[in-house]
Image (spheres, helix red, strand yellow):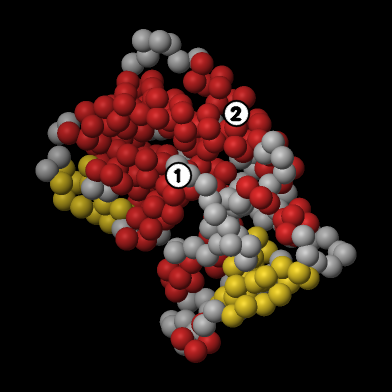
Amino acid sequence: MSYYPASARRMGTISLSIGSSGNQDRCPGPLPATKLVIVNARAALFDLYGDHLRSRGGRASVAALVRLLAPLGIAAPAVRTAVSRMVRQGWLVPARLSQGPGYEATSKCVRRLDEAALRIYRVGTITWTGRWHMLVVEPVRERSKRERLRADLSFLGYAPLSETTWIGPRPSAELDPILNGESIRADRFEAVLDGDPRTLVARTWDLDGIGSAYEEWLVQATNLVDGLPRDAAAAQVFAARSRLLHGWRNFLFRDPGLPSELLPPGWPGEKARLYFEREAARLLPAAAAFVDRNLTKP
């Protein structure tokens, strides 16, 4: 169950060279990434815990969860099924609350929510040292385990150079808990590229596809927000903001958060990010009031 010993985990420095062959194993992501419709209760629960409940103790009664997801068109049985699944997966644990039986985010869940929040609500400019963080993981034979690792590393901003070698613009604090939780051993290196880093980026990440997804998301998000009545009820605002957030959160699985110097001029993600931050902040007071009212109901 242990990791490589400390002597084998020490950070090394290597140099990368760009060859002539293209990388056919670009960083994957759920497609399409711009859907503003929340398709399942589990995704809605992650959004709810991350955007509202994390700052309110990370817990809520079952009745409150059902009430809060109702404006999204998610029925009570689907909420309860999703909660049970998240408990089995280690994201939630039962909690006895004054309002009745409920569920609390686990430390594993909190780490994931915090990692996501740092990327959803980026503050300031992301600095880059010019070095890459590289992982060489042991081969994983079990398919489900391999798919989980691939999804987790993609979420953290890594892309595969080969089946066992991954690269990202920076290390992640969530990396060790993920590898330890799956009992996967890995060497990690600080890598210096011998060549133009933008060439590596173009080979490794589908920036054209990600950029187009941002443009599509911005059109859908603008239509969603502009469609809200001026006197919209708090439940309507909560639902619209939740859909806005859900569509934006999907980019965490596609966009590695590359520093600006590695992105093409006029990167669509920046315009989309500014719109999301402005509208998410503007809609927050009404959405938060809706959450607070439903959390305190018996």
Q: Identify residue type, mark 2.
A: Leu
Residue 39, image x and y in percent? Answer: 51, 36
Q: Which mark is residue 213?
A: none
**Total numbered labels placed on residues in the image:** 2
Q: For this view, does 14 lie left or right of residue 280?
A: right
The image quarter containing residue 111 is bottom left
Residue 12, image x and y in percent? Answer: 59, 80
Look at the picture and state if 45 lies above or below 128: above
**Residue drawn at point x = 35 percent, y = 48 percent:** 83
Pair 1/2: label in front? 1
Which residue matches tag 1? Answer: 123
Q: Sort mark 1 into few (<14), some (14-19) or many (20+) by Cα contacts within 10 Å.
A: few
Residue 237, image x and y in percent? Answer: 38, 22
**Residue drawn at point x = 45 percent, y = 70 percent:** 176
Q: Sort mark 2 into few (<14), some (14-19) or many (20+) by Cα contacts within 10 Å.
A: many
Which residue matches tag 2? Answer: 218
Q: Check the image and name the residue furthest to the left.
A: 98
